[in-house]
Amino acid sequence: MYETPYHSRDLSQYGFLVTGGAGFIGSHIVQYLLKYGAKKVRVLDNFSTGSFDNISDYMNNPVFEFIEGDIRDLDTCHKAVNGIDFISHQAALGSVPRSIIDPITSNEVNINGFLNMLVAARDIKVKRFVYAASSSTYGDHPGLPKVEDKIGNPLSPYAVTKFVNELYASVFSKTYNFHTIGLRYFNVFGPRQNLRGPYAAVIPLFIEAALKKEAPIINGDGETSRDFTFVENAVQANIKAMLLEHLDGHEVINIAFGGCTTLNQLWAKLCQITDTNIAPVYKSERIGDVKHSLADISKASSLIKYVPQYSIDSGLETSYKWYRNEIFSKL
């Protein structure tokens, strides 16, 4: 992975902060920045959902710094941004089901923590603040593909928090001349995505089922569709958005592949990759889930020159090999 650079600037001139850098997407951004010679790469994480294993290989790297701390503490955020040029804000509590069970904590982390990071970044006048937005913001809007300026009503507390992030970023842009970019991720997947715990994403769970020759559980009839997006595509978007030379105002862009895959099709693809032929077990649909999701990525292409390199098929192949070699070979 990351054989092709997504930047033209000399990264050795800049310091980067990745909040949530011990998490799934964040640790991949860290990997890219270190590989291509960033001057400083600092991670802020409290390990609530991230893992030390994701960053352990970097602890002896002289340009890598780690702060164990919580974005809900403003002093910690100010400490984390000191001497930083670019911020990729990935720290958040994801998962629709988690937010339905515990909306208060999701609100505290995703809204209060986000506001703390905005304030800290504004105060030191960082060159660019890029943050993880979410396709959940489209809510009940029926239109496909999803276009940035057409959203509906949120369907979960998590979706509310991510929409509020966009509102705060927009207000900061207008009030403080502090311009930011929100990346509306569409179902990002890939190596290091957690397959343990109650809120594991569908692809690692499907890969686990295929490797164990077990039937996967599908919520609903399997015709729910998603624009599954391989993690390197998300990393490309973060790098290009952070290093964008000129930005006038707050922008939100879809980050996806631009394709549509049902859960039934997803399982069929994995069956083909793993030479498996097992029928899924179907259960009731989850509360708060959007039925269909497909992104229009033309704005990302225009604004930051985003060109996704991995399709669902190539991403599944890479992910399957990683889980097989790094997780299940050790069991």
Image: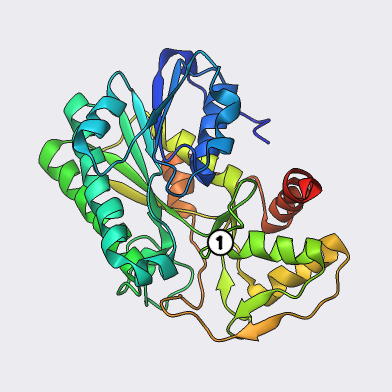
Where in the figure is residue 35, as x and y percent of width and height? 60, 23
- The local crowd at label 1, few if under 14, some if 14 to 19, many if 20 or more residues have their Cα within 10 Å, is few
**Residue 265 shows in the view:** yes
Horizontally, residue 262 falls left or right of residue 236, namely right
Horizontally, residue 126 falls left or right of residue 319, namely left
Q: Residue at x 20, y 37 (%)?
A: 74
Where in the figure is residue 95, as x and y percent of width and height? 44, 63
Q: Nearer the viewer, residue 196 or 153?
A: 196
Where in the figure is residue 268, as x and y percent of width and height? 77, 71
Q: Nearer the viewer, residue 56 or 111?
A: 56
**145 over 192 or under it: above or below:** below
Q: Residue at x 42, y 13 (%)?
A: 13
Horizontally, residue 207 falls left or right of residue 129, namely right
Q: Amino acid at mark 1?
A: Ala
**Residue 126 shows in the view:** no
Residue holding disc 1: 200
Q: Residue furthest left?
A: 175
Q: Residue at x 58, y 84 (%)?
A: 220
**278 over 181 or under it: above or below:** below
**194 over 263 or under it: above or below:** above
Residue 89: quadrant of the picture: top left
Residue 176: quadrant of the picture: top left
Q: Total label count?
A: 1
Q: Secondary structure at mark 1?
A: loop
